[in-house]
Amino acid sequence: MKPSPKNAPRRNNPFKFLLIIALIGASLALLFPKDMSTISTEKPEEISLTSFLEKYQQDELKTIEIKDSQIKAESFDGQVYQTFKEPSSNIKDLGLNDLTKKAAVKVVDTSGGKIWFNILIGVAPFLLLIFFLIFISRRASAMGGGEGGPFGFGKSRAKVYDKTKHRTKFTDVAGAQEAKDEVTEVVDFLKNPKKYHKMGAKIPKGILLVGAPGTGKTLLGRAIAGEAEVPFFSVSGSEFVEMFVGVGASRVRDLFKTAKRNAPAIIFIDEIDAIGKHRGQGSGGGHDEREQTLNQILTEMDGFEPDTSIIIIAATNRPDTLDKALLRPGRFDRRVHIDLPDMVARQQILALHANNKILASGTDLKKIASKTVGFSGADLENLLNEAAISATKKRQKDITQSDLDNAVEKVSMGPERRSRKISEDEKKIIAHHEVGHAIAGHFTKNCEPVHKISIISRGGALGVTWFLPEEDKYLVSEEKMKDEMISLHGGRMAERLIFGQTTTGASNDLERISKLARSMVMTYGMGDSKKVGPVVFAEKSKGWSGFDFHEKDFSEDTARAIDEEVHRLIIESEAACTKILKEHLPMLKKIAEDLLKKENLSREEFLAYFK
């Protein structure tokens, strides 16, 4: 197999190498001319000019050599002397032209070497500059002006999909069936455009993939590249914008120009919100550069020729920040939502990622899927990876159900911190606090079932009460939110009933309670107060020049009424929680004592107390 031109070995030119050696030798010869002196090379004795002239007059010198301002002389007994004269003095001025003396006087002419030396010093910088320009121009030509070349600032940084390295297919994407169906149509359009044109259908110019982080937007883009038999150009939105003005727009032009030459083709822009945010919010600098890049994208997307088969696929988890001109029909015609996976989708994702893992017989992925409500595809992949790491550390042959369960808890609540030293008194407070949450939630109608209670520190929490939903829910009722507030009050009120005081451990509970109550009143129109009513009062966050501020659309009297309603909801839920705990105070103490001994209580162990 012949090597490709890109990877072919470079062949050295011997004539070029010899020319470089010759130039170096000539330069050294000019800079360091050969010493033609006939005087001995031993170290001379430096004497004054007067002493030298005295020795000359006494006829003690055999040879005298004058080179510029330096005078060297050798006596008849082999002694070498050295002295210096004025640059303007000559032989006659020094009196060295006496023919009666035995000394042979020789004057070395160095004017020729000085001329070449001065010429070399004056010309060398220009020669080096010329050679440098020739070098970088050839390098730019060899690279085609790409991103690695010195003239590649305005060139696209898009990576062309290589089928030999990436083999992601639609079968590697589990769960998001509707999203796969949407993009499958696009791939089929590029493969078989005639059957669509026959029906008068036009190819969508842009598809926007929208979803929460980790739901598989980029994975779906890789699958499109693997399925489509057309050139696929992948680039990130942040790669367009640089500190130089106009570079981003130039890269956009180069990207679309390359795609048009290879049409039909697909351009995939990941994290498009990096360049597609609302225009008009900047005031110079990088914002203007970003807006120029966005304007160029808008122009290129709306300027396609009718027969050009180019599709733009973009991914973002912040569609609300995108410019309206980018989302109108004719640019991004289709918006594909990729939601968090439901129960069935989670089971499919777990099964897909478990293909390359050794699972023990009897492991139930459906049980794990039921425990992972709200997990994204990336979270589920991470869960299986954590289980595999745990099994490897234990030197097991396969991954057991216990490894999977521990991985769910580790991903959800953080790793256990058994090294944290907690006193016995604090453990009692933590145990009663967590059991208070569990009992308060258990005796409400709409709170999720208790899955586990633990007083082992995890992450930043000293203890955990884990409520786990039994099924996927997409709506939250007012009564459920009130019951959740009652459950959150359980830890703090248990401390007060048992120990007569509260601790700082309830700070996060109070934050969540306050947030729930304020959302009920200001966002969802819940509550009984006629002063507030079913009106949305949520503050709007606006940004300008990098600063965020909150704008209120209501008066101070309304704000006071909102505060009163929020306070009423919190006080009512606290009273309801206190009533529940007082009725079941002996049970609270009993469960807390057992929790101190076991450190963990499962759902079955907790429910056994109420049978």
Image: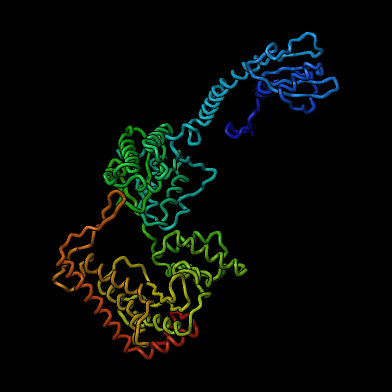
Residue 246, can we see it? Answer: yes
Which residue occupies the foreground of this view, 131 or 513?
A: 131
- In this view, the residue in front, 333 or 185, is 333
Measured from the top left, where is residue 497 in percent x and y?
A: 34, 87
The image quadrant that residue 258 belongs to is: top left
Can you name the residue that lies furthest to the top here?
99
- Foreground pick, 566 / 601: 566
Closest to the observer, 93 or 593: 93
Q: Position of residue 162 (x, y in %)?
A: 51, 42
Left or right: 231, with 559 as reference point: right
Answer with the quarter of the image where residue 514 lies.
Answer: bottom left
Q: How many marks?
A: 0
Instruction: Indicate the quadrant containing the C terminus: top left, top right, bottom left or bottom right.
Output: bottom left
Q: Name the quadrant of the N terminus.
A: top right
Kindly tell me whether residue 611 is visible in this rendering.
Answer: no
Please determine whether, in this image, residue 560 is positioned above or below residue 126.
below
Residue 341 image point, x, y percent: 39, 61
Q: In the rendered image of this protein, does residue 436 appear above or below residue 237?
A: below
* Figure check: 518 above or below 157: below
Q: Position of residue 593 (x, y in %)?
A: 45, 88
Q: Residue at x 58, y 31 (%)?
A: 5
Residue appearing at x 42%, y 81% in the figure: 430
Tell me which corner region of the image, top left, top right, bottom left or bottom right, holds residue 519.
bottom left
Residue occupying the point 28% across, 80% down: 574
